[in-house]
Image: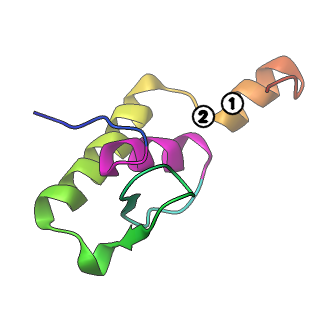
Amino acid sequence: MMNERHGGPWDRGRADKWYGRDIRPHYFEGATYQSRRVEAVDMTQEQVDEYSSGDRWQTLQGETKMDIEVMTGGLTD
């Protein structure tokens, strides 16, 4: 079962795709940006796969933050 915890590998893969960032598997041990960031070299294959799954999920949603900004004229939060 996929762990969708905020800051976890799946969440980070999804967020990186949403914000148009490069694919760089990582996750945070706790709160995003407020806890230790774990890089790909220190991740298990399962964690890297979760990151990739989040990226794929966001791709299947068919939109990114940039898409929304274009449609709304930049009026996003």
Q: Which image quadrant is residue 68 in?
A: top right
Q: Secondary structure at mark 2?
A: loop
Label 2 close to label 1 by CB (< 8 Å): yes
Q: Amino acid at mark 2?
A: Thr
At 51% from the left and 43% from the top, the residue drawn is 15
Q: Which image quadrant is residue 63 in?
A: top right
Quadrant showing the N terminus:
top left
Give the percent coordinates (x, y) of residue 16: 51, 50
Q: What's the mark number on residue 59?
A: none
- Which residue was labeled with disc 1? 67
Q: Secondary structure at mark 1?
A: helix
Q: Which residues are magenta?
A: 7-20
- Which residue was labeled with disc 2? 64
Q: Does residue 18 lie above or below 62 as drawn?
A: below
Q: Does residue 15 lie above or below 35 as drawn?
A: above
> What secondary structure prevails in the magenta region?
helix
Quadrant showing the C terminus:
top right
Residue 46 lies within the magenta run: no
Question: How are the colours assigned in the image?
Answer: rainbow
Q: Does residue 4 lie above or below 40 as drawn?
A: above
Give the percent coordinates (x, y) of residue 59: 42, 36
At 69% from the left and 30% from the top, the residue drawn is 67
At 40% from the left and 49% from the top, the residue drawn is 13
Q: Amino acid at mark 1?
A: Asp
